[in-house]
Image: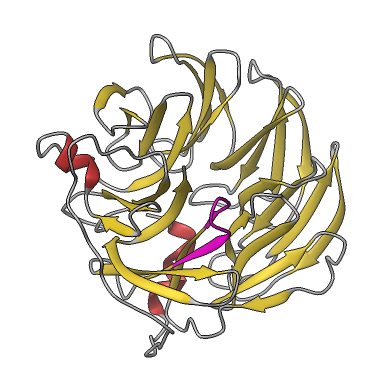
Amino acid sequence: MKSFKFYLLCLSLLSVMFSSCGDDETSISDGQSFDNGVLIVNEGPFSGGSATLDYYDNAQDSLIRDVYSTVNDGQVIGSILQSVTVIGNDAYLVVNNSAKIEVVDATTMAYKNTITGVFGPRYIADLGNGSAVISEWGSDGVTGQLKLIDLTTMMVTDSVSVSGPEQMIVSGAKIYVANSGGFGESNKVTVHDLDLAQQSEIIVGKRAIDMVEDANGDIWVLSGGSFGTNDGASICRIVGDATDFCKELSGFPSDLISDASGNNLYYVENGGVMKLELGNEGEDITLATNVTGTIYGLGYDGSQNTLYVATTPDFSSESTTYVISSDGSTKEFTTGVLTNSFVAR
């Protein structure tokens, strides 16, 4: 569960109207590939049940539900699908509560392997040298670590302690890690060599959670603020090993993403979608003003220039995903329980 989003599920939901809607679902056909559309990551119910993975096919303009289980003869993903990352020909499904990472063929979704030895895993990032790094909170949500994984053997080869690590950016032979503190609180981005040795730390807002790299190669980090009070929420830009811009945020912000160019950033603040344009950092633009539900995930498909917004009613019901085109037209469809992110292919 995205623990820093608990507050969202306490908000009341309003009705919403869009220019077009429907559930144009389809079944998986022979030879179906999953490399021309968007993978839709559904955490699954907080207790009981399993996470799922849906897919929106751009060529067919159709939604395919629960593709992992369908392709793999009913096999389930497990409890709380935190994130999905494509590295080379494989997709890595990071399953938080089940303490594992499922490895599938990124084109067919066929199961290939399972990575174990991870506890409370959050994200995985490619190091470009045959290895990847995994962020995890640990089994107690406090003893967080980064773990080095050999992508050939799928074995953990090294680790280093950090404080509730979340998203990571690999840039310039460095690993930038957002430290949330797990169930505690941290206000740091740690910077590591590719062997995980820590070089430095950068002070940002409280509970650093999301990171993106922009068109200039600079790192942006969003901090969600303290639980309960929202104190210390911010978005900061890191240039080298220091921040050169920080902006205070409110309303428990989350879900920092960028468009394909890296010139426009998007995030959720006060229940709405905000857009930050490089060069105009002080004046954010409010988007998707007709989305009034509880937003739980954002994504961007650069091939179609479309913004994905997922809303959820509660911990156990299916989500609604809205696809917003550059001209403002919108379509909507039903996706799995707690849709939290999107992976454009």
Count every numbered label the image shows and give the total: 0
In the picture, measured across the screen, residue 75 lies left or right of residue 249, that is left
Residue 314, percent from left and from top: 30, 72
Q: Is 275 situated above or below 58?
A: below
Residue 231 lies, in percent from the top left, at: 67, 69
Could you tell me residue 68's position as x and y percent?
23, 40
Would residue 344 be found to the left or right of residue 109 on screen? Answer: right
Above or below residue 275? Residue 55 is above
Residue shown at 24% from the left, 27% from the top: 111
Q: Quadrant of the N terminus?
A: bottom left
Q: In the rendered image, which quarter is residue 105 located in?
A: top left
Image spot of residue 248 (x, y percent): 76, 69
Residue furthest out toward the front: 59
Magenta-tinted stretch: 300-309
Q: Nearer the viewer, residue 214 or 326?
A: 326
Nearer to the camera, 2 or 71: 71
Residue plotted at (22% across, 61% down): 25
